[in-house]
Amino acid sequence: MPKLDVAAIETYAKAYAAQLCNEQYAQRDRINGEALLQFSPVSQVNLFVIRNLYDFWKETATAFRSPYFNFEHEEVKTALQSFLNTVSKHISVERKDLESLVAQSTHESLELLLAPQEYFEGWLRELPDFRLTPDDLKSLKKYNRIHKGIVEGLSERLGNETVYINRAVEWVQELVKDSGRLDSKAGLLDTFSTTLPVDEQTLYKKEIQAESTQNFFDQVEVTPAGSSPSKDAFYVANSGISRTESSPESIASSISTASEAALPAPDYAAIPTSPAITPAEDVTASVNDQFSMQPTMLNEKLKEEKPAETVSSQYQHRPISSIHSYISLNHKFIFINQLFKGDATAYHQAIDELEQAQSFDQAKDLMNRVYAPQYKWRDVADEADDFYEIVRRKFN
């Protein structure tokens, strides 16, 4: 299965959101709740927008709380709920605030449609305490309209129980193999195209095809029984040299040239050296202090401070095979907006370069030397710490 080109999806999502806003805001300055439910011909996009607004609505309730007042009093709780219910009926959004929400919802809808396994696994990884509960699935069902068979399958297996997400991930992998639980991609992409044409193939990364599929053993010439191959038969078969020009000197010269040409290029991008980062410049000190300790000091510190690990904490600290695949959609948006100033292309280029690093020290040097100063990560230390922790686990 080809991998999604997330940068291409991001580009399409922004263009799609802009086109919808051009149409919907042509005759009005604000969009209300009823209009949001019909904003896009793709209902999944609308539902994700509503879900995000619901999250903002819950944050409003939290913002009201204060240590100086009793918000647990029944009269206060009733009044606050009544107020929030009233506010929810008066949604009113300007274009400048809605367009980014529509782009994010479009992006998420396309990833759900085209890569359901990665999408659902990412959703599971964000659950509190690394556990899946019936209430979690209830919330997912409410806002899900694509590949509903996957959600139903999870509900069938979970019942009224609670499981750790590693078990739920196994269920997702089994369910995705059942094509009867997946929706048609073509039909939904056609619906997207009614607003802005989209070619599915442009949303996948282009894979580089190998120049030749012939293996080493296929190149060895087979000689008839009773005859012996000439001394240069093997060399000729493997170097592409014609037998008419195969003098010992020309064979040796050609083999040397062919061998040099066949050497593969290194599979990682060379990272240039630079002056060492001083402790004051290292924005990752809060995450990486442990790497600067002497071994004896580190062991003593671990003995003193290491708590008993739970099943969920053990799962959380397992090494990961790919930075790209581990970062969930929500964290991806956070990292793009906070760490790369909203530049999705720069984010994906950075991840690709970090994936190619040969060690955590090399990856850390790249982050400290290039990304941290360029995008001022010191101003968003919490997000930078989260990002460094994920990269560290790649090289754990």
Image (tube, rainbow, N blue to C red):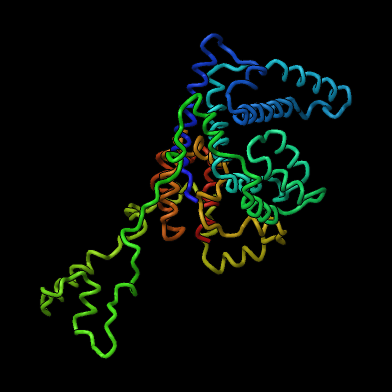
The residue under the point 63% across, 17% down is 35
Residue 238 or residue 14, whichever sits in front: 238
Name, please, the residue furthest toward the bottom.
226
Residue 58 or residue 117, whichever sits in front: 117
The residue under the point 34% across, 75% down is 217
Name, please, the residue furthest toward the top.
27
Direction from residue 12 to residue 45 in the image, left or right: right
The quadrant holding residue 331 is top right
The quadrant holding residue 142 is top right
Q: Is residue 379 visible?
A: no
The quadrant holding residue 320 is bottom right
* 242 lies above or below 83: below
Residue 183 or residue 334, whichever sits in front: 183
Total numbered labels:
0
* 350 lies above or below 232: above
* 349 lies above or below 18: below
In the rendered image, residue 370, in percent from the top left (x then y), is placed at 39, 45
In the rendered image, residue 111, in percent from the top left (x then y), is placed at 55, 40
Direction from residue 170 to residue 243 in the image, left or right: left
The residue under the point 57% across, 65% down is 297
In the rendered image, residue 155, in percent from the top left (x then y), is placed at 75, 46
In the rendered image, residue 54, in percent from the top left (x then y), is placed at 69, 28
Residue 69 or residue 213, whichever sits in front: 213
Q: Is residue 82 visible?
A: yes
